[in-house]
Amino acid sequence: MAFFFNFVAISFFVYHLVRFIMWAVLDSDIELFFLSKLGKPISSLRGKVVWITGASSGIGRDLAIALARHGVKLCISARNISELLKVKQACIAQSNGSLGPNDVYVLEMDMLHLNHHNDYFNMVLDHFKTVDILVNNAGRSQRAEWASINIKVDRELFELDVFAVVNLSRVALNFFARNSMKGHLVVTSSTAGLIGAPNSGTYTGAKHALHGYFEALRNEYPNVHVTMFCPGPTATNFLQECFTETPGAKYNHSVQPTDRRMTSERCGHLYALAIANKTHLSWVGPFPINVLLYIGLYYPNLKRVLLKIVGMERLKRIRDTHE
């Protein structure tokens, strides 16, 4: 009996040691890594209609291009119509002739106009007749000290990053139900939705709220696929649009070429793989992001010790410059 328990203990230790080492060298969680090698290819989505909000730049843009390469029909929406038209051109050019102008629908849309979400959805239906997958990608990050954040900022950020996402997803969910479709809801969360991010209290709270909302949805509607995708530091223009502690203000900083971040193109490719394989939860990011996530999720007591060793200033640098 003692031998059995020792064997179990050693096996458990080796298993987690291997997972830890793999997380240290990979740029995604282990499940997504294996799915990228052995799972469904992105091309399995060919012919599907995927609606991506916040698709005019960054991760949304590169996700759209990654899907277009494999013949996925797209609705791309955002407020900036001129940038959306550029994304449409890039998608068609990258599709190797599998997509025409009518296969990429450009929708000028403000996510904060919740009263018009049904109208927006009907516009997509008028064009494609269906929506197979909704990707809730629109949103903004934040840089601010917790104690100095004006409560109006909390409300504004939650309106965009949480309530707009939840409302549009309910519109899609009702469409899936009316048409007896399984459907697929996808949410761009963040590593801040898995562990607390310093200097982003409202943003961290919003991303955690999304996980709560969609976990409850998943339990109530087991036939609807829900994918939560959590990028770590990524080279996009997100710092310019970040909320701060002051209502109406923007952080207005730029990602630097020397920052060690995942490229937006790589993030978009991994995102497309997560969607194709209907993962429940995926996260991406180069070392040491995956190690911190692994410890934070599986060994929360050890995380507290590690954070004391690393220190908050070092953690901030890891997040914003990835040094």
Image: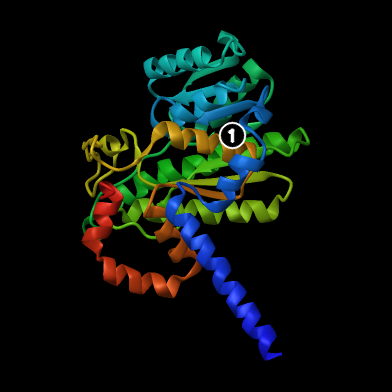
In the picture shown, does residue 228 fall above or below 131?
below
Q: How far across and how far down the image is residue 269, in percent?
A: 51, 33
Decide: is 121 above or below 12.
above
Residue drawn at 52 percent across, 30 percent down: 52
User: Looking at the image, can residue 152 be seen?
Assistant: no
| Location of mark 1 (residue) | 134
Q: In the displayed structure, would residue 6 be above or below residue 149?
A: below
Question: What is the total number of numbered labels drawn onto the structure image?
Answer: 1
Q: Nearer the viewer, residue 4 or 140?
A: 4
**Would you say 58 lies left or right of 210 here?**
left
- Quadrant in which residue 312 is drawn: bottom left
**Residue, x 29% and y 36% (percent of image)?**
241
Residue 101, quarter of the rendered image: top right
Query: Foreground residue, 163 or 5?
Result: 5
Q: Can the viewer see residue 269?
A: yes
Q: Residue at x 66, y 84 (%)?
A: 5
Q: SS at mark 1?
A: strand
Question: Residue 60 location in percent, x, y?
Answer: 45, 31
